[in-house]
């Protein structure tokens, strides 16, 4: 892959052009990443609403019918339901790891086996979350980049 940069003082916004001979998985992943760059979800925390960039999200968890968004060093609440966020974010590297949790695989540091056929995911911020057995294949597919197109 070749990357070229060009400054143009007459530009009002960043423009990215992707040239390819065939639109393969790598091209799709690059496009998905670039589209996720500006994607945000509305959250509340510290008595204020704020827009959180999806690239900053480590995982999203539903507890007692409330949905929480976990960042590297902060937790926010959102009015979205987990299933809504799953369908909206799966293209951008988010995968369901349990009935109540979806994980951003881009912040995954390592995975190790636990007893009862479960796995433990260690995240880049040192936090650990469990991956249930029934969601393990989805995690493997996401790590291999075999998302449905």
Image (cartoon, rainbow, N blue to C red):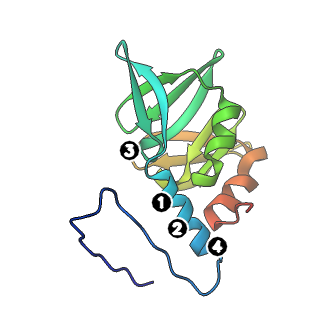
Mark linked to residue 34:
1
User: Percent position (x, y) of residue 117?
Assistant: 74, 47
Q: Are marks 2 and 3 in contact (CB under 8 Å)?
A: no
How far is mark 4 from mark 3, CA to CA?
A: 28 Å
Given this view, does label 2 or label 3 mark the residue nearer the observer? Answer: 2
Q: Which residue is mark 2?
A: 30
Mark linked to residue 3:
none
In the picture, which quadrant includes the N terminus?
Answer: bottom left
Judge whether 101 appears above or below 118 on screen.
Answer: above
Which structural element holds mark 1? Answer: helix
Who is closer to the viewer here, 13 or 50? 13
The answer to whether one can see residue 101 in this image is: yes
Residue depicted at x 34% and y 34%: 73
Q: Which of pointers 2 and 4 lies earlier in the amino acid sequence? A: 4
How far is mark 2 from mark 4, CA to CA?
A: 9 Å
Given this view, does label 1 or label 4 mark the residue nearer the observer? Answer: 1
Which structural element holds mark 4? Answer: helix
User: Percent position (x, y) of residue 120?
Assistant: 58, 46
Given this view, does label 3 or label 1 mark the residue nearer the observer? Answer: 1
Residue depicted at x 65% and y 77%: 24
Q: Are marks 4 and 3 in contact (CB under 8 Å)?
A: no
């Amino acid at each position: 892959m070749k990357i070229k940069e060009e400054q143009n003082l007459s530009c009002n916004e960043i423009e990215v052009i992707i040239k390819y001979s065939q639109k393969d998985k790598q091209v799709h992943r690059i496009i998905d990443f670039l589209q996720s760059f500006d994607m945000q979800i509305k959250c509340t925390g510290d008595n204020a609403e704020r827009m959180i960039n999806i690239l900053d999200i480590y995982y999203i968890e539903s507890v007692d019918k409330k949905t929480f968004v976990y960042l590297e060093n902060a937790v926010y609440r959102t009015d979205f339901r987990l299933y809504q966020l799953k369908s909206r974010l799966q293209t951008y590297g988010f995968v369901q790891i349990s009935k109540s949790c979806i994980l951003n695989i881009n912040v995954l540091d390592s995975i190790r086996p636990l007893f009862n056929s479960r796995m433990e995911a260690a995240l880049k911020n040192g936090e650990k979350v469990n991956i249930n057995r029934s969601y393990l294949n989805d995690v493997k597919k996401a790590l291999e980049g075999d998302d449905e197109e």
